[in-house]
Amino acid sequence: MAGLGLVAASCGSGDDKPGAQGSGGADGKVTITVGCQPPKSNPKEREGWDADVAAFQKLHPNITVESKDAFPCINPDTFQAKLAGGTQEDVFYVYYTDVQKIIKARQAADISQYVGDVKAAKDLRPDVQGVFKDGDKTYGLPRNNYNMGLVYNRKLFTQAGLNPDAPPKTWAEVQEAAKKIAGLGAGYTGFGEYSAGNTGGWHFAASLYARGGSMVGDDGKTAAFNSPEGKAVLENLKKMRWDDNSMGSKQLLQWEDLMRMMGSGKLGMMIGAPDVVQSVNNDFQGKFEDYGVTAVPESEGKSSLSGGDGYMFNPKASPEKIKAGLLWLEFHELTPGQGQFNYARAKEQGRPVGLPIPDLYGDSAPGKEIVALRKQFATVPVDHFTPYVTAQSTITNKLEPPKAQELYAVLDVAMSAVLTRKDADIDKLLGDAESKANKILAKNT
């Protein structure tokens, strides 16, 4: 859901050539600054990063990596100033949702002529690498990629007489499972959903994409969610809330609310990416072994709301810096068994291993190698994610819409209405939301 509000002003013209920000020295040595070093407050990950920098520099003694640990890794309040002032990193971190805005504003270097040297690039999922492309030009490489799923409590499934190894594939199956879980007794909730703080609109988009719908039209200028798919999202929730009573009476929930409910062991299902399980385990007193993840119902053969992050290059970086930066990214972000995929080290450090993210490669050879390494060094029940992993080959990643947070805020109104008012008029809610969304999107032209 994170995003960076970029102004249209460019810090350079489209005719700028790499090289304005220092080339390699006459001795062939080059120094690059790289963003998003883990902060000191995360000592295990920082220790791994620093060890990787040392190992990389030993392999490439002509390259010096200067790590920057500013947190958050990209900040809309300082991004423009850092670019204009020459303090932006040579290799800077970026959310998927900001990539195209940065490209359009000419605030990242075109790395097309160099990226072919990154051997792993040819095996990346096309929809993942496509995030960093504009036409036939490439402007960055991914670090993380995920799409939404259905997180469920396997323990409650068993208690309710459901098979935790065969989670719901359709919303009708979700409804039936939710009723059985809610029937376990007071305090149990079959299915939980957000409806405040922009989170309701976010999950509306996730459910909409899974049904084959879209938030905006292909031109990005008009809303497209007032559709049969959008109506089905709200009708489904209204039915579970009022006819089935499987969602509980407490509504207007935001992010932490569902996480706490899932951690309590009394929430059966919620939409979320696989890292929800990690957060529930680490921060909300849940246990890894109690949870599973599958695809968002009905998303197979369609789309799933996706997200992730990666790195782009300062538009003033020299060719030497770009080539050195690509070597670092290949080493640290894209190679099975090392850098972020050094699962042996993560296990030694006591960090969780086995979550099915990031998914950068799909079923290509590096992807299969990464999956094998996750299983080899797993500290969490890998099999509990099998339904999610199995579905991925049929699902296309679909990014958040333009003006995402503003659209989510508009759709919070519709989500909260159907969950708090039995007489909510779905057609009117979607019509009102469409009108407001069109005004927001008109400002995007």
Image: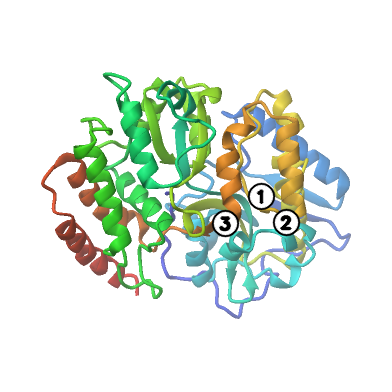
155 relative to 258, above or below:
above
Residue where numbered disc 1 is placed: 34
> In the orientation shown, which residue stands out farthest toward the front?
161
Q: Amino acid at mark 1?
A: Val
147 relative to 303, above or below:
above
Question: Disc 1 and disc 2: Cα gap in Å?
Answer: 8 Å
Residue 255: tell me if it is visible. Answer: no
Please state which of residues 296 and 203 is positioned toward the viewer in this rendering. Answer: 296
Residue where numbered disc 2 is placed: 325
For the point 29% across and 43% down, the residue is 197
Please state which of residues 382 and 70 is positioned toward the viewer in this rendering. Answer: 382
Placement of the C terminus among the 4 image quadrants = bottom left
Q: Is residue 400 left or right of residue 432?
A: right
Name the spot of residue 77 as percent of width and height, x first: 42, 52
Helix, strand or loop at mark 1: strand
Q: Is residue 331 left or right of residue 80?
A: right
For the point 47% across and 49% down, the residue is 75
Residue 306: tell me if it is visible. Answer: yes
Question: Disc 2 and disc 3: Cα gap in Å?
Answer: 33 Å
For the point 62% across and 44% down, the residue is 68
Q: Amino acid at mark 2?
A: Gly
